[in-house]
């Protein structure tokens, strides 16, 4: 029943703000950031080593640990899955889709989605903090510590590090304002301030759908809640 209701809600609107989390990328084989093993089993260690503070304290060691923590994503062995393609398919059928994603892997853009807000930044580039020049992923992988060709400073990744400001929050709120429906996919809604967005949508009275494998602390905010495998649910929605 919930699935049919969700399908009808999506069919009946022309614009959707889609909030996506790690559950969207896991279908491509990319583990959740907090599921990486070995040295990085403690959240505290990860949060310290990939922080703005540690980047400025020891940029050389920072890059070594950053590449290790995100090693799977940096390998670029992964492509968009049918969840990414489903959102692009909605767009191709005339819907205005704005994806607001916590993921830093760039797969929504790779799938062809035209309006993507990368709330936590991207792994695919880095910027010189001195001169502002931008560099792409292949350049970042050429050396252990990427240096700006122009001025010699160590580059800073375009991922939002712990301690960095979130610069896309206002854009995300604007996208929700302009949408008729809010669809939340594959996120536990535990990370702030991203988890403010469903509350904001609720305050505006936007119809909303949550699809996530596990219950979240915000389930009660949504009109329709589906706890199941995201890939499976999306395939059913497409039918």
Image: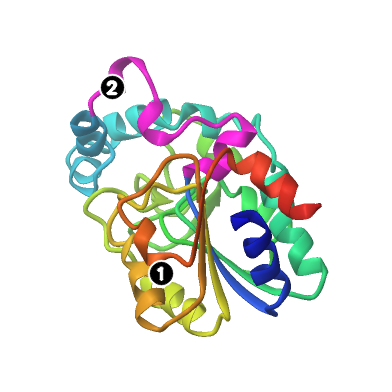
Mark 1 or 2, which is nearer the eye?
A: 2
Residue at label 2? 41
Residue at screen point 42% across, 42% down: 147
Closer to us: 74 or 46: 46
For the question of whether residue 160 can be seen, the reply is yes
Which quadrant of the rendered structure holds the N terminus?
A: bottom right
Query: In which image quadrant can residue 45 be found?
Result: top left
What span is in magenta?
A: 22-42
Per the image, label 1 sits on a secondary structure element best described as loop
Q: Position of residue 142 (x, y in %)?
A: 55, 32
Q: Quadrant of residue 13?
A: bottom right
Left or right: 141 as drawn, with respect to 53? right
State the mark number for residue 168. 1
Percent position of residue 19, x then y:
50, 60
Task: Give the residue displayed 45% in from the left and 72% down from the top.
Answer: 172
Q: Main secondary structure of the magenta part?
A: helix
């Amino acid at each position: 029943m919930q699935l049919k209701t969700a399908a009808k809600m999506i069919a009946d609107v022309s614009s959707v703000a889609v909030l996506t989390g790690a559950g969207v990328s896991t279908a491509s084989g990319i583990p959740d950031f907090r599921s990486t093993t070995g040295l990085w089993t403690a959240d505290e260690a990860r949060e310290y080593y990939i922080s703005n503070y540690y980047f400025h304290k020891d940029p050389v060691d920072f890059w070594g640990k950053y590449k290790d923590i995100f090693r799977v994503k940096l390998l670029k062995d992964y492509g968009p899955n049918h969840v990414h393609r489903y959102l692009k398919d909605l767009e191709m059928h005339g819907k205005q889709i704005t994806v607001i994603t916590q993921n830093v892997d760039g797969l929504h853009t790779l799938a062809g989605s035209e309006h993507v807000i990368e709330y936590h930044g991207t792994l695919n580039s880095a910027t010189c903090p001195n001169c502002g020049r931008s560099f792409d992923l292949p350049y970042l992988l050429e050396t252990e510590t990427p240096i700006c060709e122009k001025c010699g400073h160590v580059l800073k990744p375009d991922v939002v590090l712990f301690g960095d400001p979130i610069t896309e929050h206002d854009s995300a709120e604007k996208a929700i304002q302009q949408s008729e429906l809010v669809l939340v996919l594959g996120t536990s809604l535990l990370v702030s301030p991203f988890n403010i967005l469903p509350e904001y949508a609720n305050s505006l009275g936007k119809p909303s759908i949550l699809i996530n494998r596990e219950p979240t602390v915000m389930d009660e905010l949504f009109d329709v809640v589906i706890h199941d495998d995201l890939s499976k649910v999306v395939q059913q929605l497409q039918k």
